[in-house]
Amino acid sequence: MSRISTDQVKHVANLARLAISEEEAQMFTKQLDDIISFAEQLNELDTEGVEPTTHVLNMKNVLREDKPDAGLPVEEVLKNAPDHEDGQVRVPSIME
């Protein structure tokens, strides 16, 4: 018994804006049914006492501490700006 129908495959293809032929729908139905069958084998495993994990390694936050640093001097920033006025970078207006 198939766990997924050809109509379901066609529906998902339509949602993804994919045009598939009838032959492709049949092929994908078989392939997806095989994938679902393979994934269902995981239900046969005894997971009693197994802690849920989000990562296989016991890692904590490995990022550096977030410390504020001094920014660039205004003169240096404005030196690279194509247009500036009164210590600020000027950009084209987007509102009229």
Image (cartoon, helix red, strand yellow):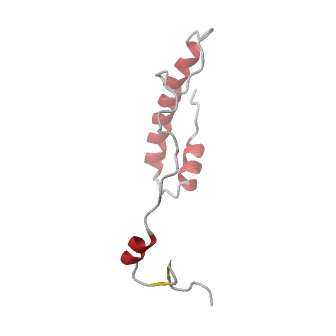
Q: Which of 88 and 24 is in front in this view?
A: 88
Vertical position of residue 26 compared to residue 61: above or below: below
Q: Position of residue 6 (x, y in %)?
A: 55, 42
Judging depth in this view, the residue of 24 and 18 nearest the camera is 18
> Vertically, is 76 above or below 13?
below
Give the quadrant of residue 95.
bottom right
Query: Does 28 sit above or below residue 84?
Result: above
Q: At which x and y percent is residue 84?
A: 46, 83
Screen quadrant of the C terminus:
bottom right
Residue at image x 58%, y 35%?
4
Q: In this view, does 74 lie above or below 6?
A: below
Residue at the limit of the structure toward the bottom, as seen here: 96
Residue at coordinates 58% horizontally, 9% vertically from top-left? 46
- Coordinates of residue 25 in the picture (x, y in percent): 48, 46
Across and down, in percent, residue 41 comes to 52, 18
Query: On the rendered structure, is 72 left or right of 41?
Result: left
The quarter in which the N terminus is drawn is top right
Task: Report the front residue among 55 and 75.
Answer: 75
- Foreground pick, 60 / 10: 60
Residue drawn at 63 percent across, 9 percent down = 48
In the rendered image, the residue lying farthest to the left is 80
Q: In which quarter of the image is residue 80?
A: bottom left
Number of disc labels: 0
